[in-house]
Image: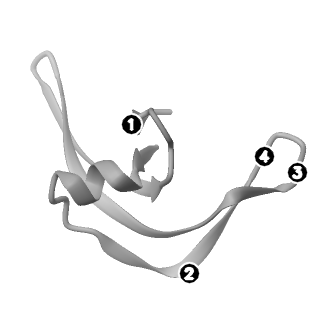
Amino acid sequence: MFIDTNFTKKDGFRMQKLEKLMLVRNINEKANVRGVITHEVEVNIFFKNHIERIKMDIYNLGRIKVTLG
């Protein structure tokens, strides 16, 4: 699960630095040009009557704000 870097900064999310950097690879196994993941955020996800607290990796997603998976 990912959340966009600019979105987290603009909306004031509390970022937590990862102990170990995470390299992002494309489907062809090459390193992604947007760099490594250095931070994460903890957020609440709401769906109907269900609430869940999750951690999301912060990454430059471009026009996409959030990717759930």
Mark 1: which amino acid? Val
Q: Is residue 50 depicted above or below 24 in this figure?
A: above
Give residue 33's mark: none
Between the residue at mark 1 and the residue at mark 4, the CA separation in whole angstroms equals 18 Å
Label 4 crowd bin: few (<14), some (14–19), many (20+), radius 10 Å: few
Say what secondary structure mark 2 lies in.
strand
Give residue 29's mark: 3
Q: Name the residue under label 2.
A: 20
Between the residue at mark 3 and the residue at mark 1, the CA separation in whole angstroms equals 23 Å
Q: Label 3 near label 2: C-beta < 8 Å?
A: no
Give residue 26's mark: 4
Quick one: label 4 or label 2, which is nearer the N terminus? Answer: 2
Say what secondary structure mark 1 lies in.
strand
Residue 42 is drawn in which quadrant?
bottom left
Q: Name the residue under label 1.
A: 66
Between the residue at mark 3 and the residue at mark 4, the CA separation in whole angstroms equals 5 Å
Between the residue at mark 1 and the residue at mark 2, the CA separation in whole angstroms equals 22 Å
Quick one: label 1 or label 2, which is nearer the N terminus? Answer: 2
Q: Please state if 62 lies on the left or on the right of 23 as rendered.
A: left
Say what secondary structure mark 4 lies in.
loop
